Image (cartoon, helix red, strand yellow):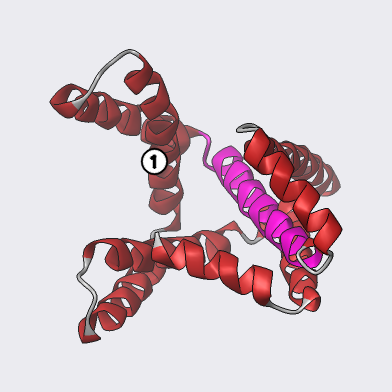
Amino acid sequence: MKWVTEWVTWIQSGESLVGLPLAAAGVVLMVLGWRVWRVSLAITYGLVGYAVCDAFVKAGDDQLFYGIVTGVVLTVLSGVLSNYAVAAAGGLIGAAVFRGVLTGFGLHGSALWVGLGLAFVGGTALSCINRRKVAMVITSFQGSILVVAGMAALVSQQPGMAAFFRGTADGSKIFLPFIILVPTVIGAFLQAADIRKSEAGN
């Protein structure tokens, strides 16, 4: 999508110091995400709303307006209805995960959409039961994205290292998912430990 490309270009062309606040914010989310998940999730819904408008509304004078309005509305709604928002996010994650599985079985068209709908309902139901764990994983993933983006900004100012990582990413399809997944898992464990420590102290 256009906004993703623009964001990546901004990171790569910016000063290396841009990476520091991004990485710092990512570390905070990875370690303390369960404490600020409502704010983080609301911001994420706002960005998703803007991205959807950017993808489906035709370019023109009103595109930015619709994107901002949709983003603000989703931010407010997800902030007010945070428990439902995290459950819906869990359902979307479940549908995204099962999409690869379903397409691997050759499903497409209406059958694929039915399968995705069932995966969304199942993921939402499970997320309602495990809201804190889902919020923990989501914020850890968000933090991982920010850490990777911050590191990319820092590395982009070093031509040799940038070429090395770019070549590695181009040569291996699992490289980027791997460097995002590992911090996500680490962050989830750190948050789980912080939760246990907090509960033990109460």
Residue 41: x, y in percent?
A: 51, 59
Amino acid type assigned to the residue bearing label 1 in the image: Leu
Q: Which span is picked out in magenta?
A: 130-154
Residue 22, placed above or below residue 180: below
- Position above or below: 48 against 191: below
Image height of 128 relative to 122, above or below: below
Q: Can the viewer see residue 31?
A: no
| x 33%, y 22%: residue | 103
Q: Is residue 139 above or below residue 72?
A: above
Verify whether residue 122 appears in magenta: no
Q: Quadrant of the N terminus?
A: bottom left
Whole-percent x and y of residue 113?
21, 30
Residue 107 left/right relative to 135: left
Query: Would you call the spot at circle 1 few (<14 residues within 10 Å), some (14-19), or many (20 or more)?
Result: some
Q: Is residue 137 magenta?
A: yes
The kind of secondary structure the magenta stretch mainly shows is helix
Q: Which residue is mark 1?
A: 92
